[in-house]
Image (tube, rainbow, N blue to C red):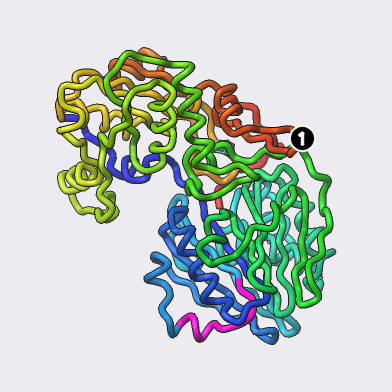
Amino acid sequence: METINPKLVEIKIISEASKMFGIWGHDQAAEITYYGLHALQHRGQEGAGIVASNGQALKLHKKVGLVNDVFNRAELQKLGGRAAIGQIHYVVGENRGQENVQPHLFRSQTESLALCHVGNIMNAHELRGQLEDNGSILQTESDTELLAHLIKKNGKKTDEKAIADALKQMTGAYAFLILTEDKMYVALDPHGIRPLSIGRLGDGYVVSTETCAFDIVGATYEREVVPGELITISDQGIESVRFLPQKKRKLCAMEYVYFSRPDSDLNHVNVHASRKRMGIELAKEAPVDADVVTGVPDSSISAAIGYAEESGLPYEMGLIKNRYVGRTFIKPTQELREQGVKMKLSPVRGIVEGKRVIMIDDSIVRGTTSKRIVRLLKEAGATEVHVRIASPPIKYPCNYGIDMSTKDQLFAANFSHEEMVREMGADSLAFLSEAGLKKAIVCDDSMNQGICTACFTGEYPVKPPQASKVTQC
Ligand code: SF4
């Protein structure tokens, strides 16, 4: 019997660190941030936190757990405030303690400073060493704390210049939200590898890593944060400077392929629409004679609809996801864990039995899930299973905040095409080309809609500094 590593099955793909939401100028800042974080819960389940400002002081509440478990009405009322920043947290590696949940709050005699961050600081190791050599004592393993120490170096006051000077020392992919008693700052790396948008809610401003959070809180989308931009929001309004020259946009392609919610727009492109186009391009590139098209819920459904539409085959719900299964990898025995995996995805026998099935998946990282699903479909009576992947093969690690940092974990990096087909037990396998992916995401140069495709191509837009140890936040 095949042994499945249920932890890999559970997370399916990597999982990106953390997402965040901020608001300025609203009487229910903490409550609105709670709802914003709720909309981003799909991006991390390890912890959540909010820091709110009432103009005189910052208050923090954070804990390990789901947004719903971390906050209740009383906690939100205690936070109060007219401005807030918050984060939902995904933990990479062993950094599961509450001390690593963000935002981080630092107090001094003159002012307080709260920060949250998504992405990966590639020269964190060097910066940490330099700070420690100069007497700083860091309390967490998070890259976010580094920025606080760099800003406050030599007793500086937190202002635009101190933040810009600190950001200039960082290399990598990052988006930061920073809150003081009287200002909120928003910053994005020069390539804009992580998404970040600004919206309006009444007279106030909201900021989010995904626009779906704007819809949930009733805000309207205003604009993208420009790569290399530092925005200051206060009661005096909004100001913007470039702390580094804007470079060609390299927004993470996996945001479109897998991470983001289908109702989010990233850099003016709707995620569902782009996934549907990935399915259309895939059907043009890799047609196959079959009876029915199905998608792996939830992130592959849009691509499966596109594939079915283009191929003229019926789209059917051949797989059902049970939303009430807990986290399978924490079950105490291997037997229970495997049962948990089986409970999570079920084939619909009445749909697939006696049929030649095209199974659309958004991506393959470790290959474990795809293998499992092919087997489930065949056990349910599918006569053939043709696997079609709505993105190119992932062959290279990500250095920019996505937890796939070693090549030996990657299915497509370690097996030939024929070996992958055999390992999966599929009747055929095809991936979308890089050109097809770019066409689906639009990538209009006149709108600076370029994407990062480094995990498919090995062409990294930001090179790690020499001798740097790449760490994930
Ligand atoms: S390497 Fe892949 S996962 Fe990482 S930022 Fe680029 S596209 Fe996204």
Q: Within 10 angstroms of label 1, few (less than 14), some, or many (20 or more) residues?
A: few
Task: Please report the residue visible at 15 percent of the width from the left and 44 percent of the height from the top.
Answer: 335
Residue 397 pos. (x, y %): 53, 33
Whether residue 275 is situated above or below residue 230 in the rendered picture? above
Q: Is residue 82 magenta?
A: yes
| Left or right for 377, reference 418 | left
Residue 100 in sight in this render: no
Residue 287 pos. (x, y %): 40, 15
Q: Quadrant of residue 184?
A: bottom right
Range of magenta residues: 75-84
Q: Is residue 11 magenta?
A: no
Whether residue 333 is situated above or below residue 9 in the rendered picture? below
Task: Please report the residue visible at 64 percent of the width from the left and 41 percent of the height from the top.
Answer: 251
Residue 203 in sight in this render: yes
Q: Quadrant of residue 235?
A: bottom right
* 250, 24: nearer the viewer: 24
Task: Please report the residue visible at 23 percent of the width from the left and 18 percent of the height from the top.
Answer: 384
Kind of residue indicated by mark 1 = Ser
The image quadrant where one finds ligand 1 is top right
Q: Quadrant of residue 160?
A: bottom right
Residue 108 pos. (x, y %): 70, 80
* 468, 226: nearer the viewer: 226
Picture quarter with the N terminus: top left
Residue 20 pos. (x, y %): 56, 60
Whether residue 416 is situated above or below residue 175 in the rendered picture? above
How many badges with numbers are in the image? 1
Q: Return the residue at label 1.
A: 446
SS under mark 1: helix
Q: Is mark 1 within 8 Å of ligand 1?
A: no
